[in-house]
Image (cartoon, rainbow, N blue to C red):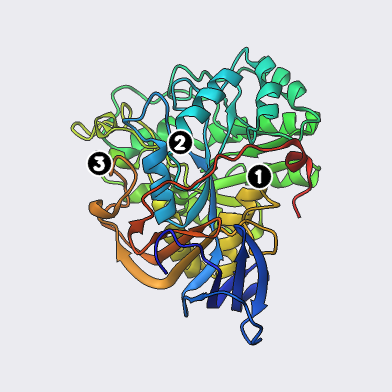
Amino acid sequence: MELGSLVGAVRSRRVLFADGVRPAVVVIKDGKIHQILSDSTHEEVGCEVWDVGDSVLMPGIVDCHVHVNEPGRTSWEGFWTATRAAAAGGVTTIVDMPLNSIPPTTTLNNLQEKLKEATGKCFVDTAFWGGVIPGNQLELRPMIQAGVVGFKCFLIHSGVDEFPHVADSDLHTAMKQLQDTGSVLLFHAEKDVHEKPEETADSCRYSTFLQSRPDIMEVEAIRTVIHLCLQYRVRCHIVHLSSAEPLKLIEEARQAGAPLTVETTHHYLNLRAESIPAGATQFKCCPPIRSAANQEQLWSALKRGLIDMVVSDHSPCTPDLKKLDCGDFMQAWGGISSLQFGLPLFWGSASKRGFQLPDVVRFLSREPAQLSSLGTRKGRLACGFDADLVVWDPEREFEIKETSIHHRNKLTPYLGLTLRGLVRATVLGGRLVYKDGCFHPQPLGRLLLIAEEDRNKKNQ
């Protein structure tokens, strides 16, 4: 099967469905899944069948937390490089965060500028979050009508001045605007509620940075989110949960009927505070990577369904902003690049803890699609869904080398690691866009704008 080819049908002995793994033939027509046939039947397909043997066939990954940074900070990342990295990792849909681009996606005009910049540059399908900042409440409904997936806000400084964090009064105003729209509000859930560490502490030690953003910051922020969620009954979502301490609050809120979902990231599930060397600022992110014991609690919460999905929070910058020359954790930019490697990062760790292959589809494809109002067209192998597929080998190991990294800046804490679960090929809308390290030369991804009926349609 050549790059750029329209794929008529794919056969695998390991096709991932919500209820298990079985041999099947997935038939594609007009960019959609047309039929799914049992491999034991000898029904005439009527087209060439691409046989991938024992490689796993599953729906493409939906990564709903990606900072592309274009326009304005294209030296950090851009649509061309980010979406190529996505395709190489089996990610067929990304949802772009409203920061750290300049301008941020906080007005209708800024959204239109973002769409103009993204046109013709995306190797995978791309949707867009809007942002809630002080004073932009009258922009929210126009952005909804224009097709944003939902909105994100910060309860603490965002790291960039053009995307200020909100006060309680801003949140109440925004929630009133979002009621009855079917939209969702995402929260960077940290609050400044503690004393800062002494300035004499060694800023090159990871423990100094970790102490500067303790668990209580997440606990108190999530307490605020839950109160708003129950008061207004607007869908709310906690991004990149790092601390296990708020899990009890989250469980109680759901029992009380709060329409609340939660994500964590690959770095919180794979990296541990105890293992971060002094000065290794490529490990810095916000909220911070916490202890090994905390990590195991996150895995347990994932298994129990308290955490709904796992995303990359791909947040790159230029190498100089990581302050590697001085190793200062307090001054370095906080963000980890991992968009290309989410599948093997998740599978390598999850499989050791008793998770099964269908769990990969649930946490990396289906649930992120539902959050993003894409649950009726993305994230499942089912008739009528987009023919977005990834072919991968769960047993195959590979080393992350700089030459194989496709996002713009190659700095990542995973460089040099050996991971398990190699992506062989990615199919987008029925067309082969990535195979064995090579890309179709032209970006074929679509810009996804959410229609009102999709937003309000119950995801099945």
Query: Nearest the camera: 325 or 201?
Result: 325
Mark 2, other Cα within 10 Å: few <14 / some 14–19 / many ≥20: many
Q: Is residue 100 above or below residue 458?
A: above
Left or right? Give the position of 200 relative to 64. left
Q: Name the mark on residue 278.
A: 3
Query: What whole-number distance in Å separates the C-alpha atoms at marks 3 and 2?
Result: 27 Å
Q: Is residue 63 above or below residue 103?
A: below
Q: Amino acid at mark 1?
A: Leu
Q: Which badge, 3 or 1, comes first in the chain's sequence?
A: 3
Camera-nearest label, 3 or 1: 1
Return the x and y of residue 260 as percentages of the image width and height: 71, 41
Mark 1, other Cα within 10 Å: few <14 / some 14–19 / many ≥20: many
Determine which residue is flagged by label 2: 67
SS for dot 1:
helix
Q: Name the mark on residue 371.
A: 1
Q: Amino acid at mark 2?
A: His
Q: Amino acid at mark 3?
A: Ala
Q: Name the mark on residue 348.
A: none
**Quadrant housing the N terminus:** bottom left
